[in-house]
Amino acid sequence: MDEHHDESRAPLSRRFILEVAIDLVDQEGLRKLTMRRLGSACGVEAMALYRYVHSREDLLSGMVALLVDDLHADQLAARRQEDGWQDFLVRLAHGVRQIALDHPELFPLVATRAPEAPWVRPPLRSLRWMETFLDTLLSYGFGDDAAVSAYRTYTTFLLGQLLLEVAARGTVVAAEPERSGGDQLSEFPNLSRLESKLAEDHSALEFEESLEALLDRLEHSLPTD
């Protein structure tokens, strides 16, 4: 079968297909991602994609893995022992947040796709990430129990904070639904009075304050000499 692949494009590969798929989802949303549309964007027939991605499930898992693996490569390259564990966790948190903000349609998949093992937690959802995270904290004096507790606490913070932020941003950009008579704010005086305050976006500040509080909590868990 003639694949009609544009020779001016990058050679067809799994990574190239996943990158194009991520771009499509960012531009058009996850619901509009089909193998036919993806094939057209890659310059090939849809059937040609199955040499590299075996199903839609494999495609979704591959996109999540690519985002997480690229984050690992970036963070590992920037890690310096002299910077301290707080710097590592701060940079990592902002790296994950950037994924959430750049790819809001895909970030929920980072939270929900099955991890490599049941005790691997999203969004740092790979054995490679887990090993790097634990190795980094252990190298700064965390004990085994403290490092495992930090992994659990840190991932819970990232997941909860960023899923809320992505959901809030999605609500802002969506068309505002019409309110039915039973939903009029006049029936809820406190909501009516505070509506403007409730609608204010303090996501970045809340993220920074919560991250700082988390680091303080982890520091208190370290043994004192």
Image: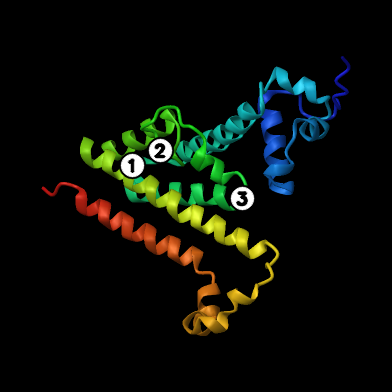
Left or right: 54 in relation to 146: right
195 or 147, which is in the foreground?
Answer: 195
Q: Give the amino acid at mark 2.
A: Arg
Q: Residues within 10 Å of mark 1 (few under 14, many from 20)?
A: some
What colour scheme does the image use? rainbow
Q: Residues within 10 Å of mark 2 (few under 14, many from 20)?
A: many
Where does label 3 land, which residue?
A: 102
**What x and y, as percent, mark residue 212?**
35, 60
Q: Counting residues from the N terminus, which is met first, the one under dot 2 or under dot 1?
A: 2
The image quarter containing residue 150 is: top left
Q: Is mark 1 on a helix, strand or loop?
A: helix
Cα separation between marks 2 and 1: 9 Å
Q: Can residue 181 be seen in this view?
A: yes
**What x and y, as percent, mark residue 116?**
45, 27
Where does label 2 land, which residue?
A: 121
| Cβ–Cβ under 8 Å for marks 2 and 1 | yes
Which residue is rendered at x = 45% and y = 35% of the image? 125
Q: Where the N terminus falls, by quadrant?
A: top right
172 or 142, which is in the foreground?
Answer: 172
Where does label 1 land, which residue?
A: 151
**What x and y, as percent, mark residue 181?**
64, 76
